Amino acid sequence: MTLHVTPDSPLPRRFTAGDLRLMLESGILREDERIELLDGELVEMAAKGFAHDVVKNALVRRLVPALPDTIYLGIESTLQLRPNLLLEPDLLLAPMSALSASPEGFCTIPGSEILLVIEVAASSLAYDRGRKAALYARHGVREYWVIDAQERTASVHREPASGGYRDVAELPRDAILQPRADGLAALSVPLAALG
C-alpha cells in the first residue's frame, strides 16, 4: 500500500507522554480532562454517568477492606505503559513494589506486574472490550474485567497474548467475580451487589 500525502491530507500527528505533559503544563490540556493516549492518538473519554459511578464506588467499597497493604489500588490513575500509551483505568491492582513514576511524571507499572484492571462501562462497552482489551493483553496485563454498568454483567479476560486474551468469559448478573492472582485470593465481587 502506498500512502500519498497532499496538502489537504496531512499525516496524523502522533503524541507521546512527554508531549502530553507539556500540554498540561502549558494549559493546552487541563488535569481534569478525560483523555487517554492510545498508540500516540489522543482519545477523548465519554463523561461518566450515574450508573458508572454507582458501580465503581461499590467496587471500591468491596475491594479496600480485602486488600493487603502490599497491593496498590489505583482509582482512575493515569497509567503509562509506553511513551505513547497512557490509559486511565477505573481500577487497577498491582504490587506496591511494581509502582514507579515515569520520566514524564505518570504512574508506570510493567504490564506483566499488573494483577487486575477493571473498567466500568456504559457507552464505552465496545471500546473497552475491543481496543482497550487488545492493548492490555499486548502489554501482559494478567486479568482484565469490563463490567457493564447498566446490566451488571461482566466480560472477564485472562491469559494475555500478543493478539488479545486467550480466555474471555461473559458472566451474567448473578455471577461472582474472583481474580486469579495469588495476592487477591480474598476478593469476591458479586455482580448483583454492585448497586
Image (cartoon, rainbow, N blue to C red):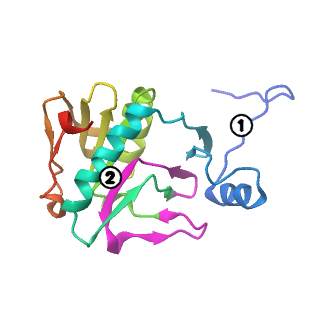
Q: Which residue is mark 1?
A: 12
The secondary element bearing badge 2 is classed as loop
Tell me the kind of residue under disc 1.
Pro
Q: Mark 2 highlights which residue?
A: 141
Is residue 87 one of those drawn in magenta? yes
Magenta stretch? 82-107
Q: Marks 2 and 1, how far apart in space?
A: 28 Å
Is 96 magenta? The answer is yes
Q: Quadrant of the C terminus?
A: top left
**Left of 73 or right of it: where is 79?**
right
Q: Is residue 156 above or below residue 139?
A: above
Name the residue located 45 percent from the left edge and 52 percent from the top edge: 76
Where is residue 151? Give x, y as percent.
28, 25
**Residue 71 location, quadrant:** bottom left
Q: Quadrant of the N terminus?
A: top right
User: Considering only vertical position in the picture, is 53 above or below 28?
Assistant: above
Q: Residue 95 at what x, y percent from top left?
A: 29, 68
Q: Residue at x 45, y 26 (%)?
A: 123
User: Left or right of 60: which side holds 42?
Assistant: right
Q: Position of residue 17 (x, y in %)?
A: 62, 57
The amino acid pointed to by label 2 is Val
